[in-house]
Image (cartoon, rainbow, N blue to C red):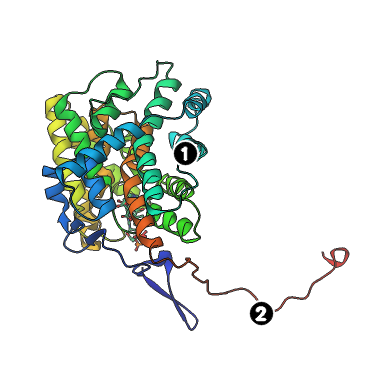
Amino acid sequence: MGAEIKGAIEYSKGLEGVIAALSSISYIDGSQGKLVYRGIPIEMLAKYSNYEETAYLLLYGELPTKEALENFTQQMKTFRILPKRVEDCIRELPPNPHPMDILKVAVAHTALYDPDRLRCCREGVMSKVIRIIAQIPTMIAYYHRARTGQDIVPPDPDLGHAANFLYMLHGKKPDKEEARIFDVALVLHAEHGLNASTFAAMVTASTLSDINSAIVSAIGTLKGPLHGGANERVLKMLDEIGTPDKAEEYVLNALSEKRRIMGFGHRVYKTYDPRARILKEYAEYLSNKYNDRRYIEIGERIEKIMIRELGKKGIFPNVDFYSGIVYQFLGIPRDLFTPVFAMARSVGWAAHVCEYVQNNRIFRPRAYYTGPDYVEYVPIDKRR
Ligand code: SDX
């Protein structure tokens, strides 16, 4: 797609290929299927790091020393607690809205009680940022427990970020191995350049609005099915297909009707998304561990068909295709898949906002006017 010509003007639909900022936070090589955070390959971070350490790396630009990581982790644990009024508000919210809508409300609400809300210095902004990153998992878990009529489970200071979320959600300490898998999934989702939700956060911040407003903009943007909302729809599609032998007919029908297969394609990756490779391994592992290969077998069949049909157009599995199978085995309800994406990506949003405003310029692109040059104003009683 890329640049389109309208008369004498060349414009890039969806800003495809447009460089809108300088950034040292991450780099994506779309043709090689490579992703680095601050220069470190995602595969190394998935193998050796955890969400807290990766969040520090993304926010501060380098891996933390042991002491710095301990302090950062402790700060995240302290900040997990929600203001009582926010907790009460979450309890009162209706059970049926999409949890991404609840998350927008909760993040906006908690900003009103942030002790650092008026601090604009770097230290004050970092405190607000870390508080939001630490509180989003609590908001999601509290909402789920309240909407299902279960007692809210307060954060456990002995558990890391990933394990604590599963604990607050399920009300019991998670299996260590599964907590580790979830931790890796959060690392994989933490950052991805100027994707739509990160760009939305940057546009908001470029007006010198506050960080909470920027995060709320990002949450609303991530909700869309073409972006973070795809993971939830992949599982729905796997259920609709039902068995691996029905995958071919389903996919070919969808493609013939120009419908999108969720979890495939990417604006930047024109080969396999490196994050999908890692998530596929975990989806395979958990399918075998639970002796339930339904989803992975349908998924692998779809993958084969889609690569056969559209691989030459650069359409491959993206991060959303296998993440839902992993989350399903971790007992995460489907409508929480995108909130979990938001929980992970909150640090990417924050890192880009903090980086961009250091050398800020308000985002203000233009549109190529295609309307009439002049139209007479006709009084209403003369209009037909
Ligand atoms: C994420 O930007 C990021 O980094 C996002 C993300 C992140 O970490 O932040 O990676 C997370 O959002 C992953 C993407 C999740 N969304 C989906 O899985 C939804 C399905 N995917 C598509 O809608 C699409 O691939 C996008 C939105 C992801 C990318 O859209 P583009 O780059 O605008 O591509 P396009 O719509 O111009 O499509 C190009 C061609 C079209 O065919 P033609 O009209 O040229 O014949 O590829 C086809 C499309 O029809 N195509 C697909 C397809 N994706 C693209 N055909 C079938 N199924 C698909 N999934």
| Residue 196: x %, y % from top left | 39, 55
Describe residue 114's horizontal placement relative to residue 358 as left or right: right
Q: CA distance from mark 2 to mark 1?
A: 50 Å
Q: Is residue 9 visible?
A: yes
From the viewer's side, name the closer residue of 57 and 74.
Answer: 74
Residue 20 position in % (x across, y down): 38, 68
For the residue pair 240 and 59, the one nearer the viewer reads as 59
Query: If you read the primary sequence from the N terminus, does the residue marked by circle 2 or circle 1 appear first?
Result: 1
Q: Quarter holding the C terminus?
A: bottom right
Instruction: Evaluate if marks 2 and 1 touch, with contact meaning CB atoms under 8 Å apart.
Output: no
In this view, 372 is above or below 48: below
Q: Secondary structure at mark 2?
A: loop
Look at the image and tell me in which quarter the N terminus lies: bottom left
Q: Give the residue number, with chain letter if any, for mark 2.
A: 373
| Residue 368 in the image: above or below residue 129 | below
Q: Residue furthest right?
A: 381
Residue corresponding to mark 1: 114
Disc 1 marks a residue whose amino acid type is Asp
Judged from this view, the residue extending furthest toward the bottom is 8
As drawn, is 336 to the left or to the right of 382?
left
Within 10 Å of the Cα at label 1, are there few (<14), some (14-19), or many (20+) other Cα atoms? some
Quadrant of the image where one finds ligand 1? bottom left
Give residue 59's mark: none
